[in-house]
Image (tube, helix red, strand yellow):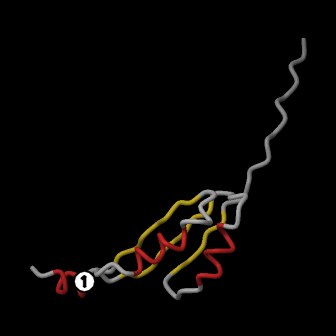
């Protein structure tokens, strides 16, 4: 079966987990978008990056790219032990 026929039959979702990759995330998105298979969506999951990763993905502005921004979980105080 040819690659083109497979492309018509299946759509692919790509999930890209990322943390502090502002310098490389656009290259990664370009690479995925330029694949020959039919893409349904590209989901970039930003794991609380402290650099400009989120801004780069938002600025990329491609209709296939969706962003999930994970929120930092606050640490809970340990319960005090009573004697």
Please say if 19 is above or below 38. above
The number of callouts visible is 1
Depth order, front residue of 60/48: 60
**Rendered view: 4 above or below 15:** below
Measuring from the top left, give residue 29's x and y in whole percent. Answer: 48, 74
Tell which residue pokes out farthest to the front in this image: 23
Q: Where is residue 57 drawn, in percent x and y?
A: 61, 75
Residue appearing at x 82%, y 30% in the figure:
78
Q: Residue at x 32, y 83 (%)?
A: 38
- Label 1, secondary structure: give it: helix
Quadrant (top left, top right, bottom left, bottom right) of the C terminus: top right
| Rendered residue at 73%/58% (across/down) | 50
Q: Residue at (81%, 39%) from the top-left corner?
A: 76
Q: Which picture quadrant has residue 5?
A: bottom left
Residue denoted by label 1: 7
Q: Position of residue 80 (x, y in %)?
A: 88, 24
Q: Residue furthest top?
A: 83
* Residue 26 shown left or right of residue 71 in the figure: left
Tell me if 63 is positioned left or right of 82 in this view. left
x then y, percent, for residue 1: 9, 79
């Amino acid at each position: 079966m040819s690659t083109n026929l497979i492309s018509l039959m299946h759509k692919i979702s790509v999930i890209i987990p990322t943390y502090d990759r502002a310098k490389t995330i656009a290259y990664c998105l370009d690479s995925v978008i330029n694949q020959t298979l039919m893409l349904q969506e590209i989901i970039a999951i930003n794991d609380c990056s402290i650099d400009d990763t989120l801004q780069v993905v938002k600025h990329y502005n491609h209709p296939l790219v969706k962003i999930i921004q994970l929120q930092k979980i606050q640490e809970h105080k340990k319960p005090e032990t009573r004697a």
